[in-house]
Image (tube, helix red, strand yellow):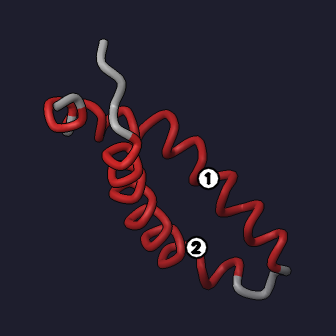
């Protein structure tokens, strides 16, 4: 199997992470706004990393599969 070019993988990650961060900030931003920055970051990454690894990146790899491997 041919390896995906890094620039295409970077675009795929950006397509997943930007809307995920934006939506997560929108939905939980008010609840965590008074916490310290390290705690906010811990909460955000604790949600976003599993979401990226187990949901968004596999979904985008399936959707963008043909383009990623060209």
- Front residue of this view, candidates 15 and 4: 4
Mark with earlier residue (1, 2): 2
* Residue at figure coordinates x 51%, y 37% from the top left: 53
Q: Is the residue 1 above or below the residue 40 in the image?
A: above
Q: Is residue 32 above or below residue 21?
A: below
In the image, 25 versus 11, the foreground residue is 11
Q: What residue is drawn where x is 45% and y is 59%? A: 17
**Residue 65 locus on image (x, y percent):** 21, 31
Q: Residues within 10 Å of mark 2 (few under 14, many from 20)?
A: few
| SS category of the residue bearing label 2 | helix
* x, y percent for residue 35: 81, 80
Decide: is 38 above or below 61. Answer: below
Residue nearer the viewer, 54 or 33:
54
Task: Where is residue 66? Give x, y as percent.
Answer: 14, 30
Comparing labels 1 and 2, the label whose residue is closer to the camera: 1
Q: Are marks 1 and 2 in contact (CB under 8 Å)?
A: yes
Residue at the spot of label 1: 47
Where disc 1 sits, the SS reads helix
* Distance from the alpha carbon under mark 1 to that under mark 2: 11 Å
Q: Quadrant of residue 43?
A: bottom right
Q: Nearer the viewer, residue 7 or 65?
A: 7
Q: Is residue 28 left or right of residue 9?
A: right
Q: Is residue 48 above or below residue 38?
A: above
Q: Quadrant of the N terminus?
A: top left
Using residue 7 as the reference point, say whether residue 44 is left or right of it: right
- For image coordinates 48% across by 78% down, the residue present is 26
Q: Which residue is mark 2?
A: 28
In this picture, residue 58 sits left or right of residue 53: left
Q: Residue at x 58, y 73 (%)?
A: 28
């Amino acid at each position: 199997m041919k390896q995906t070019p890094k620039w295409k993988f970077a675009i795929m990650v950006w397509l997943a992470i930007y809307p995920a961060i934006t939506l997560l900030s929108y939905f939980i931003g008010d609840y965590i706004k008074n916490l310290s920055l390290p705690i906010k970051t811990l909460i955000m990454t604790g949600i976003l990393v599993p979401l990226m690894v187990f949901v968004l990146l596999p979904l985008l790899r399936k959707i963008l599969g043909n383009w990623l491997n060209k």
